[in-house]
Amino acid sequence: MKELALKYGCNPNQKPSRIFMENGKDLPIEVLNGKPGYINFLDAFNSWQLVKELKIATGMACASSFKHVSPTSAAVGKKLSPALKKACFVDDIEGLDDSPIACAYARARGTDRMSSFGDWIALSDECDEVTAKIISREVSDGVIAPSFSEKALEILRAKRKGTYNIVKIDENYIPEELERKQVYGITFEQGRNNFKIDKELLSDVVTANKDIPEDKKIDLIISLITLKYTQSNSVCFAYDGQAIGVGAGQQSRIHCTRLAAQKADLWHLRQSEKVLNLQFADGVGRPDKNNIIDLYLSDDESDLVLGDDVWQKYFAVRPEPFTKEEKKAYLKTITGVSLGSDAFFPFSDNIDRAAKSGVSFVAQPGGSLRDDIVISAADSYGMAMVFTGMRLFHH
């Protein structure tokens, strides 16, 4: 198949629309079900690059949850703790521990469930039955993977009344070195960003603390590869084999850091006993549970979830308030978080904000006129910071 006609482009008025290969070769994909659209394929091809590269760098099964051409999260296939399973709403999935690719997607989907609502999924390995079961019960637009088991296909083809988008990609496909796109009728051309991200990139530790454990190096790699396929400016927090907070597309780096930190904080708080012990009423679905948990953890709207009409509708037992002071105390116990940035930190305020969210390890390009101030700030918190020497802008 050399081209594929699409219903429309980014918006319904943008017609005609298609994907094709300029060199006349066949497309490296096969649509096994559904009719993916323009934005679906933007998400599919960006997310596939992310998980393919992440698997090469870590040697582990990887998954990503994508929305509007940026990842909500990316993760490797580490087993989930009982608390994390419950926080990700997968504690009832049988066989999860035996499927690395299912563990990877459970982590990616469960990180920022609000942003992942209606996501596009990328899997580095074959989609198996366990992974398909997780996907089948979530609101999602589609999935791309190198292969699908027969049982997984059967499950996924039944999703969304038979219209769920399933795309198989040739995992051996290598794109041309030059890439092009048009803006306002003008063609842009550049070399592909083939910059390799691996543990060797983490050798220039510029802080007094030089100790970066192996598992934290993996977290830093996850953060950097995630950023490589995130709309810039961007910052990514990572922990325990997954991206836990992505701040994408902000004009100011401190706003990237604040946004990513806020998401990371929520991810940690969702695993607190107060949240895990919430007793929902029978029949409350996962999307509603997620929204109510978000309200419960919100400083601005925590009183809303405790209103009589709300708690009687959603809870079997009225929840105890989770005060601002309690949340701050809980977050102060968090350490060992990794932080990546797609460009240098121009001011130390980013480090100050990161420290409040338990960041102990940082990877950034360096090259700011204020590098010495940023390093000094990292030293004041005992952080280990790496200069990679390479910017990772993505537009």
Image (tube, helix red, strand yellow):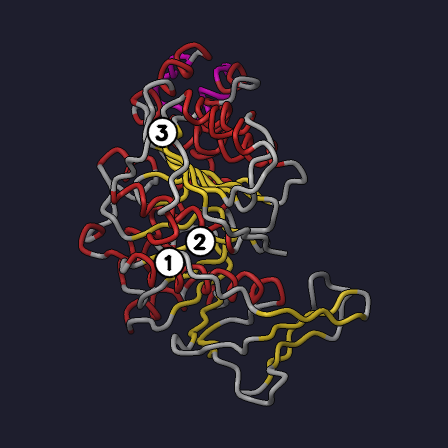
Residue pointed to by mark 2: 225
Residue pointed to by mark 1: 54
Which residue is found at the position 58% from the left and 36% from the top? 256
Left or right: 342 in relation to 134:
right
The answer to whether residue 20 is seen in the rendering is yes
Give the alpha-carbon distance from disc 2 to disc 1, as whole Å.
Answer: 7 Å
Q: Quadrant of residue 101?
A: bottom left
Q: Which residues are magenta?
A: 306-322
Query: SS of the residue at dot 3?
Result: loop
Q: Nearer the viewer, residue 285 or 395?
A: 395
Above or below residue 282? Residue 89 is below
Residue pointed to by mark 3: 208
Query: SS of the residue at dot 1?
Result: helix
What amino acid is labelled 1 in the image? Leu
Which residue is found at the position 44% from the left and 35% from the top? 290
Above or below residue 190? Residue 339 is above
